[in-house]
Image (cartoon, rainbow, N blue to C red):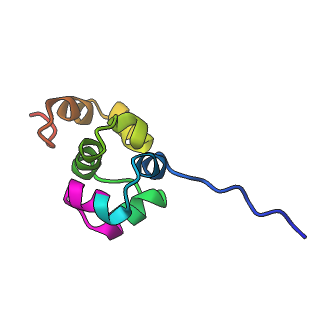
């Protein structure tokens, strides 16, 4: 009998479980579909606007919930600035 592979659980999943929310509940709070939450929990990288909406819905830290989004912004100063500005667009 072989051991099952270790299970990878996303920070998003952990935070949702911690707050005792279903995918449907979180989707309603964030204004996205349940399918979006499911895809993100499986590791898909969200658009910045979606990541922000979900982080706000969880009252959580964007960089902790979506580390890949944080890394992408770190490599693009325009995205990092727009994330702070909260406008969803890279500055001119």
Taking the magenta stretch, the answer to whether it contains residue 30 is: yes
Taking the magenta stretch, the answer to whether it contains residue 18 is: no
Disc tally is 0
Whether residue 74 is visible to the viewer of this picture, yes or no, is yes
**The C terminus - image quarter:** top left
Coordinates of residue 43 in the picture (x, y in percent): 47, 57
Front in this rendered view, residue 63 or 91? 63
Residues in magenta, as a range: 26-36
Identified at 36% across, 63% down, the residue is: 23
Which picture quadrant has residue 60? top left
Which residue sits furthest right? Answer: 1
Front in this rendered view, residue 87 or 42? 42
Front in this rendered view, residue 77 or 51? 51
Coordinates of residue 10 in the picture (x, y in percent): 50, 50
Coordinates of residue 82 in the picture (x, y in percent): 18, 34
Identified at 20% across, 29% down, the residue is: 84
Which residue sits furthest front? Answer: 20
Whether residue 75 is visible to the viewer of this picture, yes or no, is no
Which residue sits furthest left? Answer: 92
In the rendered image, the vertical position of residue 52 relative to residue 8, given as above or below = above
In the rendered image, the vertical position of residue 25 relative to residue 58, given as above or below = below
**The N terminus - image quarter:** bottom right
- 52 left or right of 64 in image: left
Which picture quadrant has residue 71? top left
Identified at 45% across, 46% down, the residue is: 18
What secondary structure do most residues of the magenta stretch adopt? helix
Coordinates of residue 5 in the picture (x, y in percent): 74, 60
Front in this rendered view, residue 78 or 82? 82
Identified at 43% across, 43% down, the residue is: 68
- 76 left or right of 14 in image: left
């Amino acid at each position: 009998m072989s051991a099952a592979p270790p299970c990878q659980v996303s920070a998003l999943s952990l935070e949702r479980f911690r707050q005792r929310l279903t995918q449907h509940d979180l989707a309603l709070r964030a204004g996205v579909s349940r399918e979006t939450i499911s895809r993100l929990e499986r590791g898909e990288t969200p658009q910045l606007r979606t990541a922000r909406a979900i982080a706000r819905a969880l009252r959580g830290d964007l960089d902790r919930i979506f580390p890949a989004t944080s890394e992408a912004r770190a490599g693009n100063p325009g995205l990092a600035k727009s994330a702070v500005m909260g406008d969803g667009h890279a500055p001119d």
